[in-house]
Amino acid sequence: MSTTNTRKEWKLTELAEAAGVSPRTVRYYVQRGLLPAPPFKGPDTVYGEEHLVRLKAIRVLQAKFLPLDAIQVELLRLGPDELKALADSEPGTLPPPGPVAAAGPSAPAPASPSRTGQAKDEAPASPPDGVTSWRRWELAPGLELHLADTADAKTRALAERVRALIQESQER
């Protein structure tokens, strides 16, 4: 999925084809703020190299099963060089997703120590290569909570409280 290309500008359909998405998806990502809006020029509107790189990076992050909100945060966090490196990586060569895929739909992740064995109140260890792993808890049918392994102790405690409250309400 190399982004090396001599072109610097694409029409909407050309950009979508180069990134492997539909034009409708490109418009949606602009609307959601995942992509910057191109300078509007009516039928002559063109998208630049940054748009293509971001679209390819989004595809890589989607291959890791990240929700769009998490992808948006990740895109904001990455610098231009990191974003390009992410876009150039092949989704098939990524390490298997962390706890998101491992935690089945009804199996919540353990609350206290994380995969690194840290205590509940310790600051989480920084993930390798700037990759954030997510834990997915199914709180109720149709309701999920996603918690980053990098979340601080207060956020993890809040997630535990939400989970406990829902569990209590289901037991009544």
Image (spheres, rainbow, N blue to C red):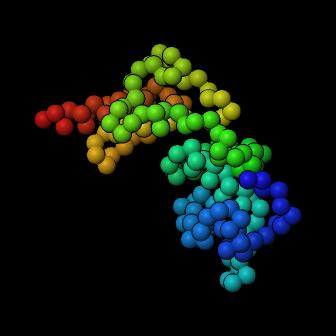
Question: Quick one: which residue is furthest to the front in this view?
Answer: 92
Instruction: Indicate left or right for 113 with 160 as reference.
Output: right
Q: Quadrant of the C terminus?
A: top left
The image position of residue 36, as x and y in percent, is 65, 62
Residue 74 vertical placement versus 150 (above, below)? below
Residue 100 vertical placement versus 84 (above, below)? above
At x 39% / y 24%, what residue is drawn?
A: 111
For residue 146, say whether it is visible: yes
Front residue of 65 and 40: 65
The image position of residue 162, as x and y in percent, is 32, 35
The image position of residue 56, as x and y in percent, is 68, 55
Instruction: Indicate left or right for 113 with 5 as reference.
Output: left
Question: Quick one: which residue is furthest to the bottom in this view?
Answer: 43
Question: Quick one: which residue is furthest to the left in this view?
Answer: 172
At x 75% / y 71%, what residue is drawn?
A: 10
Q: Could you say which quadrant of the image residue 9 lies in? A: bottom right
Question: Quick one: which residue is furthest to the right in this view?
Answer: 6
For residue 83, say whether it is visible: no
At x 32% / y 36%, what residue is drawn?
A: 106
Residue 123 vertical placement versus 63 (above, below)? above
Front residue of 158 and 164: 164
At x 55% / y 37%, what residue is drawn?
A: 97
> Could you tell me how many numbered marks the image carries?
0
The image position of residue 136, as x and y in percent, is 42, 38
